Image (tube, helix red, strand yellow):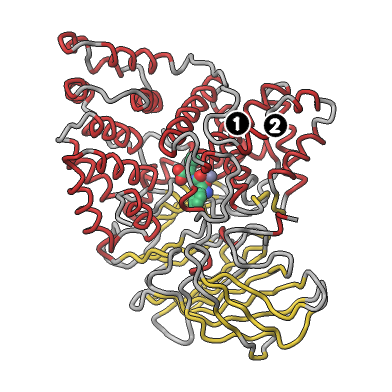
Amino acid sequence: MAERQDNSSHAAVGECTTRHLSLTLRVDFQARCIQARAALTVEAERDGLSELTLDTRDLKILKATTNGLEAKFSLGDKHSFKGTPLTITLPFKLLRGQQAVVEVSYETSPEASALQWLTAEQTAGKAHPYLFSQCQAIHCRSMIPCQDTPAVKSTYSARVSVPKELIALMSANRDGELVDDQDESRKIYCFRQMVPMPSYLIALVVGSLESRVIGPRSRVWSEKEMVDAAAYEFEETETMLKTAENLVGPYVWGQYDLLVLPPSFPFGGMENPCLTFVTPTLLAGDKSLSNVIAHEISHSWTGNLVTNKNWEHFWLNEGHTVYLERMICRSMFDEKFRQFVAMGGWKDLLEAIETFGPTDPLTCLVPGLRDTDPDDAFSSVPYEKGFALLYHLEEQLGGPDIFMGFLKAYIQIFAYNSVTTEEWKKCLYSYFNDKTKILDQVDWNAWFHSPGIPPFTPHYNTSMADACIALCKRWLTTSDAELGCFSGTDLKEMSSQQIIEFLSLLLLEPPLRLNNVKRMQEVYKFNCVKNAEIKFRWLRLCLRAQWEEAIPLALEMVTVQGRMKFTRPLYRDLYNFEKARQQAIDTFMKNKPSMHPTTAALVAKDLHLV
Ligand code: BES
Ligand code: ZN
């Protein structure tokens, strides 16, 4: 069976399975490392199991024991993106179904790819250091030696020692705190995750954090400087949770908290169980970017309960999550709004295919990842090609309510498990066993395995996009002599989402003439806009029009925040703008030591420095 293989992991999934992970972590800000013990309860999947292989990256392994007895271990060769396999010899053979506790004592490296260590100066409060993790897709192994594959799910518990002025949180329910009896200046925070989950969902944050209650099962956490703004911005959280529960069934994780990270957090949001991580660039002041919260909430079912078996099937996580996110949006607003955001998503797909090139294998819905780091494969393709497929099926099979019946059944059937695309498809055929004629008309091979634009183009209702389309056309067709026809009132009736869509439409066209962007600044004053999604698209438009005045603004945006969705395209546009190229490289080299390790690695590739 090919699917026993996870091309992104050294762990042999068919050999044994981790059932529970017990972590003892001591966070050392001076040494920028975690001194740790990880006790894995592993279960043999076959008779005669005598060794097991774990994933590691840059870990210093000090000792290994099995059921308390010292065990032999050896590290293999370091693979370019998979890291170093750690093989532990068991002092006895296990029978199928038998369990053993394997404990590894180790230290993380200051360069651990999952961790960003921030100095006090890099935080909003300037008084305390800060640490956060980001494990998806294959970075957990730089924090914990483990079977770092989403095919394996386990519960976990943790005790985390930190300086007593700081708070530690994890992707788990909080289970009390005590003084560290080894060191009076430290405190220990305890956690318990009772729902089995994949390693990529393990998450840790340590910092000077405060919280506000925003719902019956929700708090928002951040440094105190942002906590009130965050409580306002994410006020709809409980409504979204209830809406999701009405669509797909009970939320099983207990608490649903949000953590607003420092600006270098590389993603918009990360669905860490019990504690979604989000970028501070969502703080627009008007809740206009809250779809990211609907998205991360949706992962509580698609992704965290039903998980892709390996990263080649990542679209199962993200495509279904985008679909659910947009169903929440439909329930809370209306179908017209869902159509509007779905159309925006299709544009994102076209842009991603253009960036890779239409024959690039990474534009396939199910890409092969034998020789590819999942970080390099990441794009809008699994999200939006995945959504486009699900929307196409919805239309063919009888509409949103009928298709939601399938999604709910799929979640019930595969909850607490990991799935492949083939298993998903089997489930679809069995749920719609009275509609197999319709299903057989779908060009599955093209959808799953052909690069480029999908075999079917959706037609979305344009009523909310019409104003954006019309304004975009005017800017494309107006001659220099007629630029006086534009004024600030053009945007009066438009929401921030519509302004974002207007700019996205312009970005799909050939560059605007310089006079046009200058006039646009005069009338719309986009240079002063705070909304990060608007600012990002505006600066790209200016850079493509070769407007030199935009260079310092773009360099500022890539420096003050590190969300890859913004930082990478801006760096690429700066690179492609002759006059800005050297400044972009200089800015990157200067900031690199204080950047997030993943962002720094990918921007270095974008700037052709590696
Ligand atoms: N799980 C992803 C983020 C991720 C994916 C991190 C792969 C590392 C590897 C998260 O749920 C996500 O999709 N975030 C989006 C939100 C958007 C689609 C609404 C983001 O960060 O922009
Ligand atoms: Zn997602």
* Rendered residue at 26%/15% (across/down): 489
Q: How many marks?
A: 2
SS label for mark 1: helix
Q: Is residue 139 depicted above or below 457 in this figure?
A: below
Sort mark 2 into few (<14), some (14-19) or many (20+) by Cα contacts within 10 Å: some
Query: Residue lying furthest front in this view?
Result: 359
The amino acid sitting under disc 2 is Met
Q: Where residue 195 sits: x, y (%)? A: 67, 59
Q: Which residue is mark 1?
A: 327
Element at badge 2? helix
Q: Few, some or many C-alpha atoms within 10 Å of disc 1 (few <14, some 14-19, many ≥20)? A: many
Q: Is residue 332 visible?
A: yes
Disc 1 CB within 8 Å of nearest ligand 1 atom: no
Residue occupying image coordinates x 72% and y 42% = 424
For marks 1 and 2, the one nearer the N-term is 1
Residue 49 spot, x, y in % from top left: 76, 77
Q: Is residue 47 left or right of residue 610?
A: right
Which image quadrant for residue 586? bottom left
Residue 92, how many percent across, how many down? 76, 86
Residue found at x 46% / y 37%? 290
Read off the residue under disc 2: 404
The single residue placed furthest to the right in the displayed view is 434
x, y percent for residue 19: 70, 68
Amino acid type, callout 1: Met
Quote the CA–CA distance across marks 1 and 2: 9 Å
Query: In the depicted view, which residue is nearer to us: 451 or 501?
Result: 451
Q: 261 and 285: which one is in front?
A: 261
